[in-house]
Image: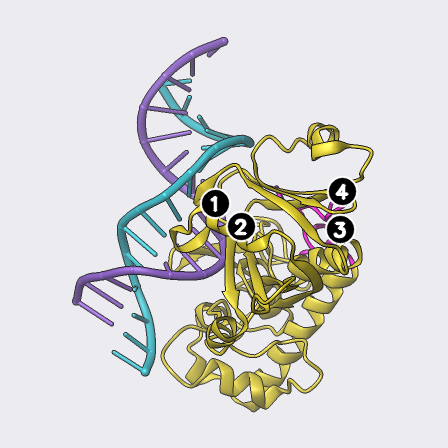
Chain colours: A yellow, B cyan, C purple
Amino acid sequence: MPELPEVETIRRDLASALEGATIASVRIRKPDILMDGESPRKFAASLRGCRICSVERRGKNLLLHLTPQGRQLAAVLQVQVRMTGRFAVAPDSDPGGRQLAEQLGFSHVAAQFELDDGRTVLYDDVRRLGGFRLLTMEAWQRRERELGPEPLDIGFKSRDLARALGHGRASIKTALVDQRRIAGIGNIYSSEALHRARLDPRRMCRTLDETDMRRLHRGLRGVLSASLRESGTTLQDYRTVSGGSGKFQNRLRVYDREGRSCSRCGEQIQRILQAGRSSYFCPGCQI
DNA sequence: CTTGTACCCTGACCGC
DNA sequence: TGCGGTCAGGGTACAA
């Protein structure tokens, strides 16, 4: 369930491993991870010879900025890991990354990238909900504009959160996970932020006053940065690039804790469905 | 425009 | 022990 802290953890790992490397060849083993039905041949041909100049993140998207050799245009490789996408980088002593794949239990390798220094980047995705999309810089910028602001940006203040969430009838929980309003938040951190802010996830955005919004802003940034410090939350599938687990699952206060007692007021944590997704909250102290 | 629902995908889990 | 049904939730397409 990678959200902002998990994707940012992956980004940091990939950036230190891959920045400056050049892609020698690409093998797509599960064609359906290419978004928009792009052909594996075309995709592989476009990436061959590209230098990875930086690895960035926007919301839950990983962005590999590529500088092609020759006269091709600069490109952006957009990656969404969604639920079960995982990366690993094998050393040149492990050609094709076979040993590493075995070691990490990568039994659904969907794509592999050979680098010109002999290393191999593996992308494994059990459910293949994640995927890749190769875009021109301009095309990426058009998509990027559809995303809401980054909640951890230094300039992101309480009033920016209020503006992002809007004043509609949408519940505060569904608004928080809507990437067009605010980027990077999913089911775990929306529930956790609302618990920190003592707000009922069913409240409509329009009912939040300035004080509520300040608490939510603080709760949201607090939980995202705390999780980032612990390399994210591993409940089932998420792993860092080195194969490690996040550690923030030990600090969750409501998510996946139905029936357990609230650490703040002792009331039993409830699970409800909102827009087909689970929300966890404490009916005792979230109002 | 806003809001809600179905879908994709596989493995873990549950009840029988 | 096996087996079918349900659920998990990213994004997106589409309907109301």
Q: In terms of depth relative to the viewer, which is nearer, A260 or A102? A: A102
Q: Mark 4 lies on which chain?
A: A
Residue A234 on the magenta span: yes
Reading the image, the residue beneath label 3 is A247
Quarter of the image where one finds residue A50: bottom right
Image vertical order of residue A99 relative to residue A81, above or below: above
**Coordinates of residue A20 in the picture (x, y in percent):** 77, 60
Front: mark 2 or 3: 2
Going by the numbered disc 3, the residue's amino acid type is Lys
Q: What stretch is highlighted in magenta?
A: A230-252
Vertical side of A48 occupied by A225: above or below:
below
Check whether the beta carbons of the residues at disc 1 and disc 2 lie within 8 A of each other: yes
First along the sequence among labels 3 and 4: 4
Please report the residue visible at 66 percent of the width from the left and 46 percent of the height from the top. Answer: A87
Front residue of this view, candidates A133 and A207: A133
Is any part of residue A60 visible from this angle? no
* Same chain assignment for discs 3 and 1: yes
Residue A174, relative to residue A6: is it above or below? below
Q: What residue type is labelled 2?
A: Ala
Looking at the rendered image, the disc whose residue lies closer to the viewer, 3 or 4, is 4
Give the residue at x 48% y 68%: A173
**N-terminal of the two: label 4 or label 2?**
2
Residue A234, x across and y down, in percent? 67, 47
Residue labelled with disc 1: A41
CA neighbours of label 2 inside 10 A, class few (<14), some (14 to 19), many (20+): few
Q: How far is the residue under mark 4 from the one under mark 1? A: 21 Å
Residue identified by numbered label 2: A45
Labels 4 and 1 in the same subunit: yes
Kindly report the distance in space between the C-alpha atoms of the residues bearing marks 2 and 3. 39 Å
Which numbered circle lies on residue A119?
4
